[in-house]
């Protein structure tokens, strides 16, 4: 049988010689067909490479029964406006049955500026809500039972003060920290690589990251302390191989720094979550990359870090598609694209999926578009039957070959970066940023030459269609004024001597060496209790750590 | 001598994929390109433009704040009495294009503009 197959396959391949060579998004050359022979060439071994779902190395999924046991969480990312509006939206969502509240912050907050700083001109309350002090946090979550919801916050560089504000807001309403649940993104390395919201240089920022991880492990056991992102790097131009390799390297850096403090890896590793992208573009490669990532991470945790608790080995993911292939004229076309990318995420075994909205190329989603996106996920969940069988693509010659191929290439890229001094050094040099920029440039040149096709962008563009009328959320100059006034009142009312003392204590702690007894979360919480503002806290850290100027990365 | 173009990111927005693609494209086309990096205030952008004696400024924004930041750059340029053509790019709604032109912006390239179109535009603009 084997011999016949070999002969037959080689003959068959010969017959396809005239075919053009095709490539995956990571530039992997693809055959027109895969057979058991290709798996044999790769040394594919069912038990070692796949095993059973819910068991090491988790290639087929992190739960034994996957979606039969529990559907993926349907999460939608949205929200903007004032604190009061956000509070109203949250209450409405709870009424509709939501248990997770996702909070988006405006850019000044994400960069550690108060609303009255001149650099925040035109940005206050635009990309999310402005949080200057614990008082803002109290308004946002007013009247919401914090022991019943989980608070998810897209916050990175100023994670420590923002988390402290949530904790202090909760404790002043009588909640014990142990009863609180939520997530902070807290993934600073990808900010340097792609998202751009960094404040301090990488090394002191990593200290803050571990401070948050350590503090939460001790005091807020239900908190997810980090969401490691590949998403933004893929959006910036990383290939699937680079995306997974670099996000894994980022996580290794966080784990290494935290373990170095003498904290057992099993005390915090199970609180790491992941945000890779999953797109409809090169559909099967996206699915295979997630399967490969699960396997590699399980191995890293078990073998490299010696984690004993199987929960520490699991690569839990929340995912969504990237934005670059969304169109902005005939936006209904995006419904099809987003349905396919969500299907890919399900086939990849995601724990939480956010289906992109058809209008997100234009701005913050409309309610109607949000609803269509949610319905898309519900169609996949309840009509297609993809939830009936775990890892339904497992065993496909192509998928298994591609998973192995991607695993090899991801490991190779990780070795390359590590051999050149590691991920932090690469970030400081700007090499990876430049690689992403060059990838994007090459990709766009291909789009120009129509060697890559995006419906709505370079074919079937429907240019005659007008851009849909939209009520985009625009910077309301009054919002900045209002926040500025509130800040002035706060500074008037609070005990300024106490604020000064707590900030001095924070500064002293910051100047001490990074040790397990100089965790900056404690003095940050004290400063927040005294009503120090976000920028006052961040400026105190800026004085010691300095501000980071990134290499251009071109 | 090669014409000099400044590509700048006004405001706190961190999306610079588009800015970098345009920078690399214009560099390939023979221009000398200076990229400011992220988080530039309108004041910093105007200062860099004057110091570097550039022939054109490209402003890239993917955040709603362009509606106030780009007119601010135009105002500062006017105050400095320098006449450097300004081109905007990124996620810019059609209804705002007229507003930006009114403020003095020469051209607006939305997302998805073919690179060749941008190159040709700058070649024409700076050949005069």
Image: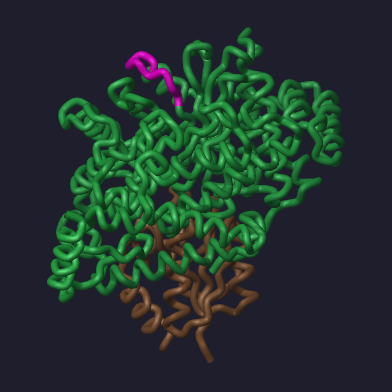
Chain colours: A green, B brown
Towards the viewer: A511 or A381: A381
Kindly identify the residue that appears in the image at 52 percent across and 15 percent down.
Answer: A142
| Residue B77 shows in this picture | no
Towards the viewer: A309 or B103: A309
Task: Write down the quadrant of residue A172 in the picture.
Answer: top right
Kindly identify the residue that appears in the image at 31 percent across and 55 percent down.
Answer: A40
Question: x, y (%) of residue A527?
Answer: 76, 27
Residue A59 appears left or right of B79 = left
Q: Is residue A455 above or below residue A58?
A: below
Kindly identify the residue that appears in the image at 16 percent across and 54 percent down.
Answer: A1
Task: Write down the quadrant of residue A219 in the picture.
Answer: top right
Kindly give the residue lying farthest to the top in the view shown. A174
Q: Is residue B100 above or below residue A190?
A: below
Quadrant including the C terminus of chain A? bottom right
Q: Magenta residues?
A: A94-101
Q: Is residue A97 magenta?
A: yes
| Residue A264 shows in this picture | yes
Towards the viewer: A425 or A512: A425
Q: Is residue A459 magenta?
A: no
């Amino acid at each position: 049988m084997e011999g016949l197959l070999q002969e037959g396959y080689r003959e068959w391949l010969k017959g396809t010689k005239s075919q053009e060579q095709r490539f995956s998004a990571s530039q992997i050359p693809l055959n027109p067909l895969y057979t058991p022979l290709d798996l044999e060439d790769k040394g594919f071994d069912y038990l070692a490479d796949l095993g059973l779902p819910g068991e090491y190395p988790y290639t087929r999924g992190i739960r034994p029964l996957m979606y039969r046991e529990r559907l993926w969480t349907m999460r939608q990312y949205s929200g903007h406006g004032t604190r009061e509006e956000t509070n109203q939206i949250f209450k409405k969502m709870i009424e509709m049955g939501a248990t997770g509240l996702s909070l988006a912050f405006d850019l000044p907050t994400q960069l550690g500026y108060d609303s009255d700083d001149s650099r925040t001109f035109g940005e206050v309350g635009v990309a999310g809500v402005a949080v200057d002090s614990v008082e803002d946090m109290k308004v946002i979550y007013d009247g919401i039972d914090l022991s019943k919801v989980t608070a998810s916050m897209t916050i990175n560089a100023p994670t420590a003060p923002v988390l402290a504000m949530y904790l202090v807001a909760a404790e002043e309403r009588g909640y014990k920290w142990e009863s609180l649940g939520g997530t902070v993104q807290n993934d600073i390395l990808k900010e340097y690589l792609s998202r751009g919201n960094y404040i301090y240089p990488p090394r002191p920022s990593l200290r803050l990251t571990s401070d948050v991880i350590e503090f939460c492990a001790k005091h807020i056991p239900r908190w997810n302390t980090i969401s490691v992102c590949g998403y933004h790097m893929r959006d910036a131009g990383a290939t699937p191989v680079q995306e997974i390799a670099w996000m894994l390297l980022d996580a290794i850096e966080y784990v290494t720094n935290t373990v170095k403090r003498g904290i057992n890896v099993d005390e915090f590793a199970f609180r790491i979550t992941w945000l890779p992208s999953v797109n409809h573009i090169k559909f099967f490669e996206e699915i295979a990359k997630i399967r490969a990532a699960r396997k590699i991470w399980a191995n890293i945790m078990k073998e490299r870090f010696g984690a004993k608790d199987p929960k520490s080995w699991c690569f839990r993911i929340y995912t969504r598609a990237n934005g670059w292939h969304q169109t902005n004229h005939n936006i209904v076309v995006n419904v099809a694209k987003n349905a396919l990318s969500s299907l890919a995420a399900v086939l990849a075994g995601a724990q939480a999926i956010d289906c992109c909205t058809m209008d997100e190329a234009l701005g913050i989603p409309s309610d109607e578009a949000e609803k269509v996106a949610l319905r898309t996920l519900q169609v996949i969940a309840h009509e297609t039957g993809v939830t009936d069988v775990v890892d339904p693509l497992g065993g496909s010659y192509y998928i298994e070959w591609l998973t192995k191929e991607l695993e090899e290439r991801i490991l190779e890229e990780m070795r390359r970066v590590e051999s050149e001094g590691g991920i932090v050094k690469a970030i400081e040099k700007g090499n990876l940023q430049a690689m992403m920029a060059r990838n994007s440039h090459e990709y766009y040149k291909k789009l120009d030459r129509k060697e890559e096709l995006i419906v709505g962008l370079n074919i079937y563009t429907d240019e005659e269609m007008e851009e849909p009328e939209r009520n985009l959320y625009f910077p309301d100059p009054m919002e900045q004024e209002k926040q500025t006034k509130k800040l002035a009142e706060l500074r008037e009312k609070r005990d300024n001597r106490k604020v000064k003392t707590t900030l001095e204590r924070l500064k002293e702690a910051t100047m001490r060496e990074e040790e397990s007894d100089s965790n900056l979360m404690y003095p940050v919480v004290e400063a927040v209790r005294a009503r120090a503002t976000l920028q006052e806290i961040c400026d105190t850290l800026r004085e010691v750590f300095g501000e980071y100027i990134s290499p251009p990365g071109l | 001598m090669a014409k000099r173009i400044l590509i700048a990111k006004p405001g706190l927005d961190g999306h610079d994929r588009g800015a970098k693609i345009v920078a690399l494209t214009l560099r390939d086309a023979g221009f000398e390109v200076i990229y400011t990096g992220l988080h530039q205030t309108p004041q910093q952008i105007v200062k860099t433009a004057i110091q570097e004696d550039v022939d054109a400024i490209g402003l890239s924004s993917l955040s709603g704040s362009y509606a106030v930041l780009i007119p601010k750059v135009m105002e500062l340029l006017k105050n400095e009495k320098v006449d450097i053509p300004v081109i905007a790019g990124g996620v810019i709604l059609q209804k705002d294009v007229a507003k930006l032109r009114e403020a003095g912006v020469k051209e607006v390239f939305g997302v998805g503009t073919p690179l060749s179109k941008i190159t040709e535009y700058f070649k024409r603009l700076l050949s005069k």
